[in-house]
Image (cartoon, grey):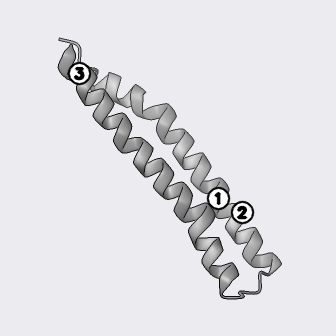
Amino acid sequence: MKENEHQLDKDAKLCRRWAFGLTALFIVAFPGIMFITGYNYSLEFFKGWTYLSFSWLIIAGLYIAFRPVVEYMKGEDGQP
């Protein structure tokens, strides 16, 4: 039981790092660099960025929702 909690804490820390890293990259760094360089935002670019963001959210949500179901069906739930 103790090793499962240790692995869970380790995995949670990894997920937090990825979440904060990707958030910083996609919300702060990429648009910030384009703002600093003086890129002229067009309506088409904004629409594309919005579609990309919503696609990312939908794919991530589906993955988060169905991954536990797939693991359960494969028998990887950690129960003896």
Circle 2 — which element? helix
Indicate whether 14 appears above or below 47.
Answer: above
Q: Position of residue 46 (x, y in %)?
A: 76, 71
- Asked if marks 3 and 1 touch (Cβ < 8 Å), the reply is no
The residue to which callout 2 is attached is 50
Q: Amino acid at mark 3?
A: Asn
**Image quadrant assignment for residue 71:** top left
What crowding class fits label 3: few (fewer than 14 Cα within 10 Å), some (14-19), or many (20 or more)?
Answer: few
Q: Which mark is residue 4?
A: 3
Is residue 80 in sight in this rendering? yes
The reply to whether discs 1 and 2 touch (Cβ–Cβ < 8 Å) is yes
- For this rendering, which residue is in front, 78 or 5? 5
What is the distance, in whole Å, between disc 1 and disc 2 at their CAs? 5 Å
Query: Is residue 75 visible in this depiction of the protein?
Result: no
Q: Quadrant of the C terminus?
A: top left
Give the mark toward the camera: 3 or 2.
3
Identify which residue is drawn at 24% across, 26% down: 6
Q: Position of residue 58 (x, y in %)?
A: 60, 47
